[in-house]
Amino acid sequence: MRVTTIHAPGDIRLEERPAPTITAPTDAVVRVVAACVCGSDLWPYRDENEITPGNPIGHEVVGVVEEVGDDVRSFAPGDFVVVPFCHSDNTCAHCRAGMTSACTHLGITSGGQAEYALVTQAEGTLVKTDGMPDDALVPSLLALSDVMATGWHAAVASRVAPGSTVAVVGDGAVGLCGVLAAREMGAERIIALSRHEPRQALAREFGATDVVAVRGKEATEAVRELTDGIGADSVLECVGNGPAMRTAFAIARPGSTVGFVGVPHGIELPVARMFGLNVGLAGGMAPVRRYLPELLEKVLSGAIDPGRVFDLELPLDEVAEAYRAMDERRAIKVLLRP
Ligand SMILES: [Zn+2]
């Protein structure tokens, strides 16, 4: 099969490799209908993460079940499924507490930008649709495998409440989905921090009431001004670097919580400020499976349309261009069709 591999920073290739096979009774093999490039795939691409040359890459997938192991009873070949990027048994103590991304049998989709993907713990991980979905729904279903659930997790972690004021740091696909999540949770005011016009426009469509188009200290001042000097009730930090986290804490009101979902790189926490102002930090790797049934229902009913974050679609054969387009910010998020 064709699978995307990374060999060095900026070196993305599509290679022929054997397709995955069932090796454990809890496995399933999914034929990929659509995959995509994640903001976190750009970390190794930009030389900010260690690379094992030739490793497959990609963790966001929807597709059709091709084959299942003997312990997988709820899914059969032909089922259309959303594949959460983190695989979980959905039965262990951590899963039962809602933390499926810390499952004792945790697995991660690796090599998802490919024709086939292996899902470990398929029984507890996959969620299927009723029959084959309309092709127009595929982008939004794909967004549920990671970015929409991750934006949702940031909103949950930062305790977004009806009528509240929310600020979202980061205008990538996750940040934009965080805006959508805050709207769904009833936030009255949603301040999106974004300096890029197409992203500002989508943020407004997703429910942002205000856009702050500056960064750093200027952004902090702008949010303070918009909130009468108080700060935001909830802050979603959807980037994962030091400047974004500094901004998040600077605009969080006393007693609030910053929800963080960007993979952290070079972050130092302002512990004195957190102590003095009683500002908390919560979040982490999103327990996608926990939110998936609810989010799937919202997509199928048309309540949310997170697939709007895909502003470029390419055949899998052009995956290297997909990375370039996202790296150069020519695209918010690229959908790939094998
Ligand atoms: Zn578990």
Image (cartoon, rainbow, N blue to C red):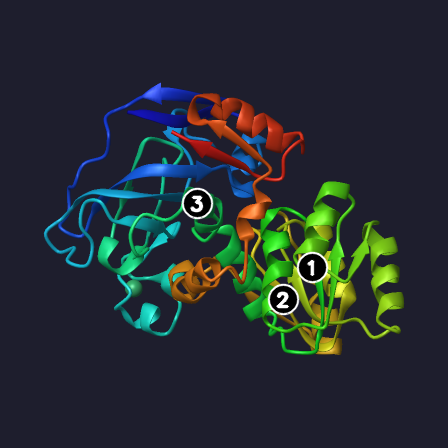
From the viewer's perspective, is residue 321 above or below residue 56?
Answer: above
Considering the numbered disc 1 on the image, is that residue within a helix, a strand or a loop? strand
CB atoms of marks 2 and 1 within 8 Å: yes
In x, y percent, where is residue 185? Answer: 59, 72
* Horizontal relation, residue 74 to residue 137: left or right: left
What residue is shown at x 28% (from left), y 23% (from top)?
A: 17
Q: What SS does tag 2 mark?
A: helix
The circle drawn on residue 222 is: none
> Given this view, does label 1 or label 3 mark the residue nearer the observer?
3
Residue at 36% x, 31% y is 114
Q: Amino acid at mark 2?
A: Ala
Decide if ligand 1 comes within 8 Å of the CB at mark 2.
Answer: no
The residues bearing labels 1 and 3 have C-alpha atoms spaced at a distance of 26 Å
Q: If the image is split into quadrants, where does the N terminus sit?
A: top left
**Amino acid carrying mark 3 in the image:** Val
Q: Position of residue 177 (x, y in %)?
A: 59, 55
Q: Which residue is mark 1?
A: 168
The numbered mark, 2 or 1, whose residue comes first in the sequence reads: 1
Q: Tell me the element at label 3.
A: helix
- How dense is the environment of label 2, judged by Cα within 10 Å: few (below 14), some, or many (20 and up)? many
Residue 167's spot in the image, x, y percent?
72, 63
Of the residues tagged 2 and 1, which is closer to the observer?
2
Q: Which residue is mark 2?
A: 182
| 8 displayed left or right of 5 | right
**Quadrant in the rendering for residue 324:** top right
Q: What's the amino acid at mark 1?
A: Val
Name the image quarter holding residue 227: bottom right
Position of 62 with respect to 196 (left or right) is: left
In x, y percent, where is residue 310? 56, 41
Q: Are marks 1 and 3 in contact (CB under 8 Å)?
A: no
